[in-house]
Image (cartoon, rainbow, N blue to C red):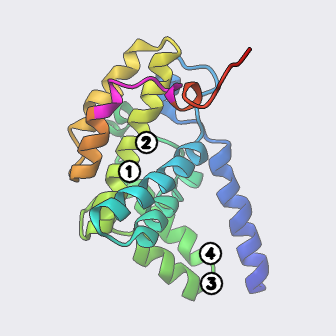
């Protein structure tokens, strides 16, 4: 198959992330929860910022975060309860191997180099990418709390226990004291 056709098919597959809801929020009862792609988009920005503040490579941390959800196009988003019954890491590793065999070898090797150790904390950027993943989940939880889903506090509390960088811990310290609409409320100016 032509290299460009292979990659076009890959791009279509990546698009599946827009259609896969984050299953933990579904279990919480959130109607129309964020997709895996929604989660990934904000995680990339968070990774970049944390890396800059921690003196790490922001581009590498962001790419790790952008790419690590790729296997979910094939195995779906498996929440913590589902992970008790399935070996999520093994399933995602197998899916990633198949995905990387499906695209040109030189590009697949770069993807693998970036994401094969996600969650294993083998570099500062890996740690930051994982922290950003947890922080994004907590920020989303705060948004859902502010919409009335008080049980999302559990996501914030559990995620807080997992972060390792000083910067991530600082954001968690601020999170429960914040309102998810603060950004908007400080910008709107009503004059008469």
Q: Which residue carries the number 2 mark?
A: 136
First in sequence, mark 3 or 2: give its number: 3
Measured from the top left, where is residue 9 in percent x and y? 74, 68
Q: Which residue carries the number 4 mark?
A: 102
Left or right: residue 20 versus residue 168 is right
The numbered disc on residue 104 is: 3
Per the model, the C-alpha gap separating discs 4 and 1 is 29 Å
Q: Quadrant of residue 51?
A: bottom left
x 24%, y 69%: residue: 122
x 60%, y 31%: residue: 187
Per the model, the C-alpha gap separating discs 2 and 1 is 6 Å
Mark 1 residue crowding within 10 angstroms, few (<14) / some (14–19) / many (20+): many
Mark 3 residue crowding within 10 angstroms, few (<14) / some (14–19) / many (20+): some
Q: Which residues are magenta?
A: 174-182
> Tag 3's secondary structure?
loop
First in sequence, mark 4 or 1: give its number: 4
Observer-side mark, 3 or 4, equals: 3
Per the model, the C-alpha gap separating discs 3 and 4 is 7 Å
């Amino acid at each position: 198959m032509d290299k460009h056709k292979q990659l076009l098919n890959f791009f279509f597959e990546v698009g599946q992330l827009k259609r896969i809801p984050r299953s933990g929020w579904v279990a919480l009862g959130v109607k129309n929860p964020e997709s895996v792609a929604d989660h990934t988009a904000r995680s990339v920005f968070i990774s970049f910022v944390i890396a800059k503040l921690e003196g790490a490579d922001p581009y590498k941390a962001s790419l790790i975060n952008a790419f690590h959800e790729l296997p979910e196009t094939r195995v779906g988003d498996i929440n913590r309860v589902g992970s008790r019954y399935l070996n999520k890491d093994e399933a995602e590793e197998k899916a990633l191997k198949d995905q990387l065999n499906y695209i040109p070898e030189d590009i697949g090797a770069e993807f693998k180099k970036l994401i094969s150790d996600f969650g294993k904390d083998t570099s500062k950027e890996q740690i930051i990418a994982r922290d950003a993943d947890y922080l994004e989940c907590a920020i989303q939880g705060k948004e859902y709390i502010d919409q009335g889903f008080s049980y999302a506090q559990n996501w914030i509390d559990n995620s807080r226990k997992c972060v390792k960088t000083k910067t991530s811990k600082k954001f968690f310290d601020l999170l429960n004291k914040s309102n998810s609409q603060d950004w908007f409320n400080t910008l709107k100016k009503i004059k008469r």
